[in-house]
Image: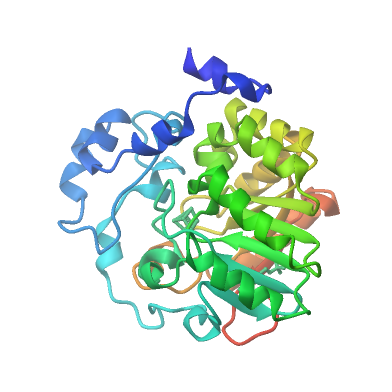
């Protein structure tokens, strides 16, 4: 049984993650049938608002059947509200377009450079800033990585490289290794950080080859997983995290505060507790980037602060994520 196999902490026996990626559901009717909600079909937007539905079967298996308010379903199902034009919600809400230096390199913060390593993801999250980002032109993968490495080499202030995207882990381990091989000529870089949702939405991605690549890197390694709700973190995700820990990786989580998904003290406390139970520390809780088509997910700042206060009063300090918002032009994430 695939579920039993992918719960293994031994990476040798996992299903092929590329197959899991290819098998992702891209048809809303199929998704609704799988979760037992075919009657919701008449509430789907006629067009996909320029951002296709995409979700792994692994993630769908963690959704509750016949629950139109399931917190995982709400993150991936297109809804009519995405078509609303809401003032203040724009295409480049975080100012990334101004910060791109070379091929896919974003250098906004001191000491850290972020690489747009891939243009796609294993899931399309409806709240994502990526909805409107012109990734096709900003790929750091493949040939452009050579240019990205040149860009890093030329800047001695950069000690940490962050692979982001899109999702860097949709790239083959071979491609990732080619890049880190190139980093050998960039001695000032001592830390590699990967931001990815694949450990959550496609945990079999954390396979033997991936763990070996990271274990053997002569760099400090950090993986920031992206989970928004405790229900995302089933035994297969726990096993993937255990495999990464065994490879010497420090694990953090980053979430987005999302109306209807995790905007309650109970949901946020459960998420932090569940993360720690699988060896992951909460890092950031992001206020939504004000991206066109996502206004229905927004939680007002006052409510966000209330929730942060509730978390502080119910959790040890190390399980309280920093509540931040990304503000264009600032030199760090902006604490709320
Ligand atoms: C968020 C972000 C980082 C990382 O910021 P940390 O506070 O170190 O997590 C780096 N570069 C860019 C462009 C970012 O958006
Ligand atoms: S970049 Fe992250 S939030 Fe956006 S679609 Fe990809 S996995 Fe989802």
Q: Where does the C terminus fall, quadrant-wise?
A: bottom right
* 210 in relation to 153, above or below: above
Q: Is residue 58 left or right of residue 301?
A: left
* 186 in relation to 168, above or below: below
Q: Quadrant of residue 149?
A: bottom right
Name the foreground residue: 181 vs 207: 181
Does residue 94 show up? yes
Q: Quadrant of residue 115?
A: bottom right
* 114 in relation to 44, above or below: below
* 75 in relation to 9, above or below: below
Name the foreground residue: 335 vs 163: 163
Name the foreground residue: 58 vs 70: 58
**Residue 69 % position (x, y):** 39, 43
**Residue 311 % position (x, y):** 73, 54
Residue, x 70% and y 62% (percent of image)? 183
Residue, x 84% and y 54% (percent of image)? 317
Q: Is residue 32 left or right of residue 146?
A: left
């Amino acid at each position: 049984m695939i579920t039993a196999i992918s719960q293994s902490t031994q990476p040798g026996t996992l299903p092929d993650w590329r197959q899991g990626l290819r098998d992702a559901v891209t048809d809303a009717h199929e998704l609704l049938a799988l979760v037992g909600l075919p009657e919701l079909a008449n509430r789907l937007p006629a067009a996909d608002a320029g951002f296709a539905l995409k979700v792994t079967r692994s993630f769908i298996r963690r959704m509750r059947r016949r629950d139109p308010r399931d917190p995982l379903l709400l993150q991936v199902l297109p809804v009519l509200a995405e078509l609303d034009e809401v003032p203040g919600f724009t295409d480049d809400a975080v100012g990334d377009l101004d910060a791109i230096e070379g091929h896919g390199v974003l250098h906004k913060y001191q000491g850290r450079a972020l690489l747009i390593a891939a243009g796609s993801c294993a899931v399309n999250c409806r709240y994502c800033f990526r909805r409107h980002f012109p990734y096709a032109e900003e790929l750091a993968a493949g040939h452009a990585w050579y240019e990205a490495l040149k860009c890093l080499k030329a800047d001695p202030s950069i000690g940490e490289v962050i692979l982001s995207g899109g999702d860097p882990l949709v790239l083959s381990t071979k491609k990732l290794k080619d890049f880190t091989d190139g980093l050998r000529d960039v001695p000032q870089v001592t830390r590699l950080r990967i931001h990815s949702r694949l450990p959550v939405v496609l945990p079999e991605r954390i396979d033997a080859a991936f763990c070996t690549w990271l274990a053997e890197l002569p760099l400090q390694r950090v993986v920031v997983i992206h989970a928004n709700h405790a229900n995302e973190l089933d035994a297969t995700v726990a096993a993937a995290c255990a495999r990464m820990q065994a490879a010497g990786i420090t694990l953090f989580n980053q979430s987005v505060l999302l109306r209807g998904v995790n905007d309650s003290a109970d949901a946020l406390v459960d998420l932090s507790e569940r993360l720690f139970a699988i060896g992951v520390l909460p890092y950031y809780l992001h206020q939504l980037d004000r991206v066109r088509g996502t206004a229905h997910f927004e939680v007002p700042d006052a409510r966000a602060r209330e929730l942060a206060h509730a978390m502080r009063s119910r959790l040890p300090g190390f399980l309280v994520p920093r509540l931040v918002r990304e503000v264009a032009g600032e030199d760090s994430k902006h604490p709320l």
